[in-house]
Amino acid sequence: MTDLRSAPTRSTGMGTLVAKITVLGGLDALAVFLGAVLVSRGDYVIAALVVVGAIVLTVIYLSERLLPAKYMAPGLVFLAIFQVFVIGYTVYIAFTNYSTGHILTQDQAVEALLSQSQRRLPDSPSYSVTVVESNSQLGLLVTAPDGTALLGTADSPLRPVDATFQDGQAVAVEGYTSLRFADLLGRQDEVFSLAVPLADDASAGSLRTLDGRTAYQYTSKLSFDPASETLTDTETGEVYVDGGEGAFVGEDGTEILPGWQVNVGLDNFTRAVSEPSIRGPLVYVTAWTIAFAALSVGIIFALGLLMALLFNDPSMRGRTAYRIVMVLPYAFPAFLGAMVWSGMLSQSFGFINQVVLGGASIPWLTDPTLAKISVLMVNLWLGFPYMFLVATGALQAIPGEVREAARVDGTSRWQMLRHIELPLLLISMAPILIATFAFNFNNFNVIYLVTGGGPRDTGAGIPVGQTDILISLVYKVAFTGQNRDYGLASAFSIIIFIVVAAISVISFRRTKTLEEIS
Amino acid sequence: MSALDLTAARLERSGRRRRRKSHGLRHVAALVLSVYALLPLLYIVSASLNPTGTLTGSNRLFRLVGLDSYRRLLASDQFPFLTWFKNSLVIGLTTAVLSVFLGALAAYAFSRMRFRGRRTGLLTIVLVQMFPQLLAVVAIFLLLTRIGELVPAIGLNTQAGLISVYLGAALGVNTYLMYGYFNTVPTEIDEAARVDGAGHMRIFLTIILRLVAPILAVVGLLSFITSMNDFVIASVVLIDPEKQTLAVGLYRMVSNPNYADWSAFAAGAVMASIPVVALFLFLQKYIVGGLTAGSTK
């Protein structure tokens, strides 16, 4: 093999060089911008990663050497972000309380709480206002009691401006369009929800208008004390303190939401193993995941092998036609196959009960045991053509001499299969069987699109059903239901990581895949 | 004719009879399996031609035949089927082309260059592939939410964001497969081109890529099918109905099969699967070769 490093470096054309510098320049500019934004938001680690990444890329492409890196960098960038980083990020999330009600940072949560609890200040003066718009963002042009004009939007507090006055009231300002009455009607909701802060300090309250002409001062009934980090209800006098779990807690222990995201250590893992309403489902889901993957491999391999043995006879007529028909389920998109089966297995209207079984009412998808059998049968349908093709290939790869020698020694057909063909097949197909196991371990589509993981386990503290496997459990905990618990879902993901890693280690020890890489 | 010959002839005859009998059994088995393989497909084609729309109405195979449900689906405002179709094609094709290109670049480096950490690099990529992306779906969702706050064009609810996520798997799955195939192209060809004054980029783009075209087709097709079939990540990343893919959109149509417009779904399923099935049958030869190299659907 040749070594490209020793090849004479070709002088690159001026055009290429300019293009390269332009692209890299753009990339670096973007990285600097992102870095600055991230630093201003306090995400120092991510900012550092972005900047270091940009520097590495620049060095790779400006250097005269590092040729292999130039070829690998584009793919590696995506691999690094969406394959490696996300695994690390999963671990990080698993140690937080990231969930519905705990998505914000603490500052954002305080701000949200203050603006949520705003109500009109009794006896507050009324301000005459004009609703204005710029870049589809609404603002209020306010005529202060002393006759001067002030302008503010939801994001920027009121500040004095030079405005055009009509009858002593500010009606227009440069850079903004004043909304007419008809416009106001069309955007009522936007106008109602507009709250313009009076000052930078959120506790000063804000101006809101209900009719687009008159605004009143609203203040929050909560007030935040940054020094002690407590919220005080100015009406009842109740003090809410940081409960340490990402939310303010009142004296009687009630939490007020939204809370914020905090590091909760091993809390998610502790919950998973100590709360019975989570531990129970987790145990049976893990057991079923392993059983589902193993049984799937077993039945798919058995049928595929049987078919390969039956139809691997050149003298059989119509082999090609059979083969095309039997491969069709593999060509049909798997997600559609799962959905079609889900309809066919419907208890009261499905094809299987109504036609094949002549009007039976078997709860294929709603009985815990039958639902498990159903998903296995659907998975068999989706998987057997693939195993048939692979087993046929492996069978044909067994050298004719081996069979010949056995036949000379007088082995029967059964002995040949049992002692010669099967062992040879198992050796050559082991990597594929392991890959099939690993694939089915996370075969989300078959479970979620056929039964939705159901029938649902109503006693559990998380959305989970009798046919759920780990990955569908993660999905349901994180993305369905009232309370989306990203932290707990990530903790479950880590369990899958560990199981998959263990399987990989075992499979790599057994097969020699790695040794083939020279 | 001696007695021995007679016996031999009788033996041969009975052997032939036995073989014919076993062939008969084989045909029975083949027919049963063909029915198992074909029934759901026939059923969905029949359901799509059934004008009534319900799940029950679809049970009488080919009793009523009409294109009403196709018209109904294509005219539907609630389910923008053609948009989903277009989205799936755009996302699938872009992912396929880009991941083939990214994978080929890396495979070229691994196959043609010698550098420190080459073996470790290849090993790492094979190992990383063991962890499918969907395991990190929660982190992907939150990461894209964060990215979207900074750069909305590639954040949550964008197809560019989803494609970027898919490209994260481009190296892991494909490089090893491609690496093996690249190695079968003799290096003398590179050598000759270099003597003629071609640079490494030119050798890659104009010579090597053409010689490895079959593996590019296989990898491209597999990555197209993978992104077509993906439900988990697509359902989490794409939120607006007009941005969704076929897998997510069609699922929303029948999330409760008993009350869904089942014929319209069936029509959608037939239309969605025709290109994939056709492509598959057309490229069957290559795919079967790729399968034995160890990829799963």
Image: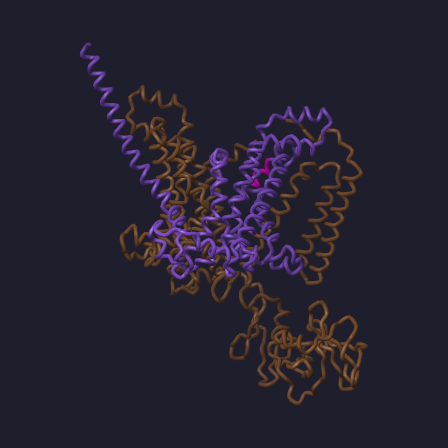
Residue A343 falls in which quadrant of the image? bottom left
Q: In front: A281, or A120? A: A120
Q: Which residue appears at 67% of the width and 39% of the height?
A: A69
Residue A445 higher or lower than A405, as above or below:
below
Residue B124 magenta-highlighted: yes
- The colour applied to the residues of chain A in this rendering is brown
Q: In front: B255, or A469? A: B255
Residue B289 magenta-highlighted: no
Residue A228 higher or lower than B183, as above or below:
below
The overriding secondary structure of the stretch rendered in magenta is helix
Q: Which residue appears at 57% of the width and 74% of the height?
A: A248
Residue A291 visible at all: no
Q: Looking at the picture, how far across and down is residue A210, in whole percent?
A: 64, 81
The colour scheme applied to this rendered structure is by chain
Residue A479 visible at all: yes
- Chain letter for the purple colouring in the rendering: B
Instruction: Return the residue found at the far right.
Output: A162
User: Which stretch appears magenta?
Assistant: B119-125
Q: Looking at the picture, how far across and down is residue B118, in whole percent?
A: 62, 36
Say left or right for A231 vs B77. right
Residue A153 falls in which quadrant of the image? bottom right
Q: Looking at the picture, how far across and down is residue B75, in whole percent?
A: 51, 57
Q: Looking at the picture, how far across and down is residue A314, in whole percent?
A: 36, 27
Say left or right for A465 vs A83. left
Quarter of the image that includes the C terminus of chain A = top right
Quarter of the image that includes the N terminus of chain A = top right
Say left or right for A325 vs B13. right
